[in-house]
Amino acid sequence: MSRVPRPPLNGLIDDLYYLDGTAPYARLMLPPMPGALLIVNLGEPFRIRAGTEAESAEYADGCVISMPTRAFEFGYPPRTRSVGAHLKPWGLAPLLPMPASELCDRPVTIEQVWGRLATAELRDRLATAGGPHEMLTVLEQELMRRLHETAGLGLVRHTSGVIAATGGAAAIGDLGVAAGVSSTHLAQRFKQLIGVTPKRLARTYRFTATVLSIDPAAPIDWSELAGGAGYFDQAHFGHEFRTFTGYTPTRYLEIRRRFLREHPGHVLDGWSLPAD
């Protein structure tokens, strides 16, 4: 189950969620997305591998992931149980004691962000809550309590909104001019609060919109898809696809179709993929 939090959190968070059950696969690959993720784990530890060359690490209390630039592989226990938040790209900044840039492509535990005692208390309150609705309320209250003033948040939020509204097609060089700041200042604020530059955020929005437009059950004209998404040509699109996922477009489609066959209508179909 999930729900949108009340203001002002709704300007930072897309939804709060409760998850309890068995993952469709023991390992799932999550491509980069224009957003951040917070997971408070209440079940057995899970594992995350950040990049194909990295070793996976275990997360018992949960994790915080700022906006990623590469795919992450999640390894799940037989049964998973967690409460968390899907955040907007800038959503973590007012909740962190450090710049988001320090977490770029480096998932950290909840304890590393909020401390051992506070994390243990939060997990205990969640575990003893009266049900999923109350658990989401507990998490919402905790996030409200941790909100702090963040310099440059309005600038980054507004400019990110322009990028999102254009599906990543906004002219990056014009964004600083429109906001009345230099491109260097804008890039610095983005790195500090999101962890990536405006250009990288735009690339992620464009890639995400393109991938989500793919119907795996239908024939795909990759050249037409690439051109419609604003890529220079199919080769450019293919290179971007491998950069973001580690897969070629055709291999991605094979995996999506496998997911569709094996788990029709599953909530995760469309973004997460079974890991090879």
Image (cartoon, rainbow, N blue to C red):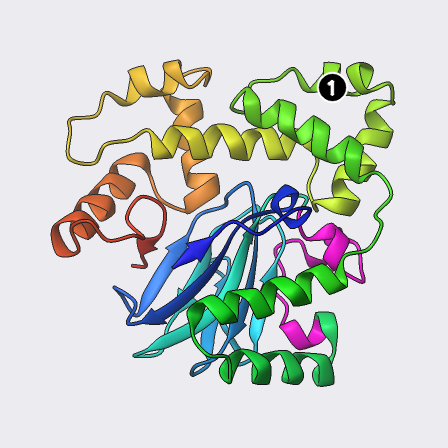
Magenta stretch: includes residue 102: yes
Residue 200 figure quarter: top right
Q: Is residue 54 visible?
A: no
Q: Position of residue 12 (x, y in %)?
A: 64, 46
Q: Residues within 10 Å of mark 1 (few under 14, many from 20)?
A: many
Residue at left offset 60%, top offset 48%: 67
Q: What segment carries the magenta color?
A: 91-112
Q: Position of residue 21 (x, y in %)?
A: 30, 72
Q: How many marks?
A: 1
Magenta stretch: includes residue 199: no
Residue 107 figure quarter: bottom right
Quarter holding the C terminus is bottom left
Q: Is residue 3 visible?
A: yes
Between 82 and 250, the one lying in front of the other is 82
Q: Amino acid at mark 1?
A: Leu
Residue at left offset 76%, top offset 53%: 94
Q: Position of residue 190 (x, y in %)?
A: 75, 38
Residue 232, compared with residue 20, is above or below; it is above
Residue 79, compared with residue 160, is above or below; it is below
Residue at left offset 39%, top offset 67%: 19
Asked whether, in this view, residue 208 is left or right of residue 181, the answer is left
Q: Position of residue 166 (x, y in %)?
A: 55, 19
